[in-house]
Image (tube, grey):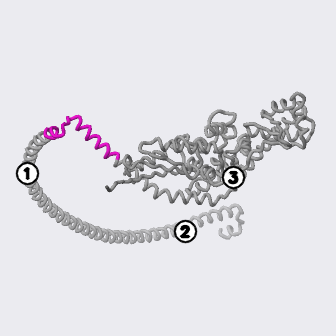
Amino acid sequence: MNAVLMQTPIPDALFAAIAFVAGVCLATIIGQIISRAKTKTFEQNLQQQIESAKKEAENIIKSAQLEAAAETIKKKEEFTTEVNQTRTKLHETELRLTKREDAIDRQVETLQQQEKQAKHHEQELDRKLHNVELKDKQLSALMVQQKNQLLKITAMDIEEAKQLLLKRLEDECEHEMSILIQRKTDEATETAYEKSREIISTAIQRYAAEHTCEVAVSTVEIPNDDMKGRVIGREGRNIRAFEKATGVDVIVDDTPGMIVVSGFNPVRREVARLSMERLIQDGRIHPSRIEELVAQTKKDVNHKLLQIGKDAAVETNVRGLNNKVLSMLGALSYRTSYGQNVLRHSIEVAFLTQVMSDELGLDGSIARRAGLLHDIGKAIDHDVEGNHPTIGANYLKRFNESSIVLNAVAGHHGDILPDNPYTPLVGAADAISASRPGARRETLERYIKRLEKLEEIAGSFKGVENAYAIQAGREIRVIVNAEKVDDDAAVKVARDIAKKVEDEMTYPGEIQVTLLRELRCIEYAK
């Protein structure tokens, strides 16, 4: 049978199925073997990890126990230290309290002793007060007795005695006041004289101006006397047209080779002079030509005034002035004051004010501006009523000038109180420029009137015997009666004279008041 089987061929399908089954079985067996091997390996690894974790946990526990023990020891040491410190502080506090208690005990003892002494003093004061009251009563009775006796001796009543006492008190007060005035004046003079003299001297030295003065020219030269007839015209029509167009008077007299132009306004007089010169050069003299030439000359003069004003502003480094203000400055070049050119005077005052301001630590630009504009009212005072400081301040107010400049312009002659340090500096510079030698001159008539006024003011005071104006009116010498005016009152009289001269007179520079008091005793030997 086996031989039959062996001889019988096995189908391929069956063989494949047997092979598949055998493969599956083999794979299953192999998988189980591998799975068992992995399981055993995993169990071994897990056991190792568990043992390692146990060891690590034991190490962590031991480390924690060591750290906890160390921390406990540290905390115990800190606590012990704090306890020791607290005990030390408590001990020190206890010592301080003990000392304080001792001090309080001593103070209590001291206060008790002082209280005893105060009671003793109070008793002593009560006793003394009682004695004072008794003496006061005795003194009052004695005073009444002496008063009655004094009234009997002097034959005066109470009211008369009171008036006599008040008169003596008034004399003593006046005497003390004179002494106080003299002392304060001396102290102020000592501190201010040298400083002011130094500042003014420095200002004058740093700015040296020419001493020559320009005078407004009001004469016109003509080539021959026949020209006078042409200027007058037929029945005087030419001269009337000229006077109407220019607003001046034309004087044609027997003076050879000259025609005089007269007018109170210097600018008008300058326009008239230039117009007359141009008419004479042109030769065509008739009313229509006169009007045309005068109009053209006015334009030229106005342009010239503006240019002169600009030059003055550039020279003094004053900026931001309106063209109308510059024209007014130019007009000052044709105006004179006691023979001194007003524009040159204003420029000089500007520089002097700046130098003094620099010495005092003030703003030099503001000082120059105030000094340059201080006399601008003189350019229009012929047309507007009032004094030139007020006119100038009102005019500049239209062009939004600063309050400092306005106050300096309005107050440089002392018409108003200064509200800034620049106003008195402008006044001082104005006086320096006016009073320097050769700067100004005045007519003999005004000079004599000023001297007479000086002597009149000085002679109006009580006790003045004679007063003499000397040194061209720069000094007034006053002689007083020595019996009516004592030494202390003499100081007050001199001060009052100087104050009255300041209030009532206008003058350049300053006037010295010298008061002399001399006691002459005359006796005759018989």
Quarter-wise, where is residue 15 in the image? Answer: bottom right
Residue flagged by tag 1: what amino acid is it?
A: Glu
Secondary structure state at the residue bearing disc 3? helix
- Rendered location of residue 504, percent (x, y): 53, 40
From what the image shows, is residue 177 above or below residue 77?
above
Front-most of 428 and 107? Answer: 428
Of the 4 image quadrants, the one containing the N terminus is: bottom right
Q: Is residue 53 magenta?
A: no
- In the picture of the structure, the residue carrying the numbered disc 3 is 316
| Label 2 – label 3 distance at C-alpha | 120 Å
Q: Is residue 152 magenta?
A: yes
Residue flagged by tag 3: what amino acid is it?
A: Thr
Q: Residues within 10 Å of mark 1 (few under 14, many from 20)?
A: few
- In the picture of the structure, the residue carrying the numbered disc 2 is 34
- In the picture of the structure, the residue carrying the numbered disc 1 is 124
Quarter-wise, where is residue 137 in the image? Answer: top left
Front-most of 420 and 37? Answer: 420
* Residue range corresponding to the magenta coloring: 148-174
**Residue at (48% x, 69% y) in the render:** 40
The secondary structure that dominates the magenta segment is helix
Q: Earlier in the sequence, mark 1 or mark 3?
A: 1
Quarter-wise, where is residue 374 in the image? Answer: top right
Residue flagged by tag 2: what amino acid is it?
A: Ile
Secondary structure state at the residue bearing disc 1? helix
